[in-house]
Image (cartoon, rainbow, N blue to C red):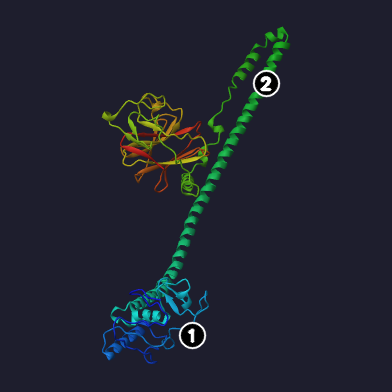
Amino acid sequence: MSAEPGSCHSTPGCTLQDDRDTEVEVTESSGNLNMDLQQPILSALNVLRNEIRSAKEDSGLSGKVAVTSSDSESGIFSGESELCVEHESDLDWFCCSEQKLICSHCTIVGSCQGHTVTALANRVTAVRSLCECCPEQNHLVDVCEKMQLQALRIEHFINKTLTAKERALQVEASGARERVVAQVSVVREAVDEEEQRLLEAVQREEERVEQCLLTQRAHWGQALAMLTQTRTHLVHTLTNTPDIQLATSGQEIADRVEDAEGVGEPCDTDRLNLNAGCSDSKLMRGLWASAILLGPIAYGSAHLTFDERTVSSLLSLSEDLCTLTFLPKRSRQSPPYDPARFDSWPNALGTLSISSGTHSWVMDVGESGAFKVGVCYTSMGRKGSGNNSRLGYNGQSWVLSKYDGDFSFCHAGKNTPLHVIHKPKSLGLLLDWPSQTLVFYDPDSSAVLHSVRHAFSGPLLPAFAVADRSVTILH
C-alpha cells in the first residue's frame, strides 16, 4: 500500500522518519520523566523542556528529536489494547483520513482501504513530538499553562467570588423580604383603616336615608289617611246630609277642604337617595387604578384609532389614523361634508364605542401646549361654535385639558384645576363601565391625576382636541 506524498506512512511496520537525517534517541529514566503526579504542571513541563534541550545539546544536533523507545517502555499503551468491532483485531493503526483507530485488516479489506494510515506508535510519537521536538514553539505546553492559569481563576471564582456572592445573596434576599413585608404591611394597614372608615361612612349614610324614608313614610301615611277620611266625610255629607243641615255646614266643609289642600304633593329628593360620595376615597381610587393598570390583567384598546369622519378641518390625520396635528390657516382644506365631522372646534373622536367592560388607552401628547383628552356621548353635537360641540363645556363630555401650561378637568363648563407637579409627555385614560369610573393617569408612574364617577346613561366615545402641535394614540 503506497503512502501519499507528504502524509503519514500507510503500510504496517513502517517507522515515523524525520525529514532530517539525524536522529537523537531520548530514553526515559526514573529520574527525569517519571515525575510525581502531584507535582505542579508548570514545574513538570519546565523539567521536560530542560531535558529535551539538554538532549539536543549533548548530541550536538539542532534537528528534531525522534523518540525510539518501545511502546511499553514509553508508556504509550496501558497494557490492554482495544479490539476492532468488525475484525476483532487489535486497534494498532490510526486512520489520518477519518481520524480514528483501526486494525490492520481495516487498511486492507475494511472501510479504510486506500486511506492515509500510520502505525499507532508513530501517531503517538508524532503527537508527543509537538511538545518534545519544538520547545521554542511549544503549543501544547502553552495550552497546559493556560489551562492551569484558567483553573486557578476558576478556583478563585468558586472559593472567593461565589462564596462572597452566596453570603451577599442571603443578606440582600433577607433585606428584600423585609422591605416587601414592610411595604405590604403599610399598604394593608392603610387599606384596612380606609375600608373601615368607608364602611362606617356607608353605614351612617344608609341609616340617614332609612330615617328619611321612615319619616317620609309616616308623614305621607298620615296625609293619605287624612285625605281619605276627609274625602269620605265630604262625600257622605254631600250625599246623606238633609238640605236644612247641609245649609249650615258650609264652614265645616270649607275647613276640611282647606286642610286637604294643605297636604301638598309628595316629591322625590336627593335626600332620599344614598350619597355615592360616601364610598369615595382618593386612596382607594388610586390603589384600584394601579391594581388594574399594573396588575396581572391588562386592559387596553389595541385597535383604537381616530375616526376620520369626525376629524375637524382644523386638523390633519396621519395615514395610520393615530396622529392628529393642528394645522395653520394656510394649510387647511375643506373636507367633504359629513354629519359626524366637527366643523368649528379642533376635535376628533375615537372609533371605540364603550358601553361595558374596562378599557384604557394612552396618548402621546409630546410638547403640545393645548389639548384635551377624555370621553363624550355618541350623541354630542358636532356642528357650530356653541358649547354643545365644545369638549368639556357641556354635560355630554368629560375631558382633561392642558392650556397655557396648566392642567384642569372640564365638564359641563366647569373647570377643576389640577395640581400636576411632573408634566407628563403622555396621558392614560381608564374607563371602568361597571363602576362608572373615569380615571386620568400618568402612564410612566401610574399616578392618578384625576378621577370622576358618573352615572353614564349611554355609550361613550374617546374624545380629543388639539390646538398646538400633535397628539398620538399609543398602542
Residue 16 is situated, as x and y percent measured from the top left of the image, at 36, 81
Residue 101 vs residue 215, the one in the foreground: 101
Locate residue 62: give its quadrant. Answer: bottom left
Q: Answer whether residue 333 is visible to the viewer in this image.
A: yes
Please state which amino acid type lies under the numbered disc 2. Answer: Thr
The quarter of the image holding the N terminus is bottom left
> Which label sits on residue 79?
1
Q: On residue 391, which mark appears?
A: none
Q: Secondary structure at mark 1?
A: loop
Give me the residue at 46% from left, 27% from top: 379
Pointer 2 or 1: first along the chain = 1
Most extreme residue toward the top is 244
Q: Which residue is mark 2?
A: 228
Instruction: Name the residue rendered at 38%, 29% in the picture.
Output: 390
Q: Nearer the viewer, residue 355 or 310?
A: 310
| Horizontal arrangement in the rendering, residue 300 relative to residue 208 (left or right) | left
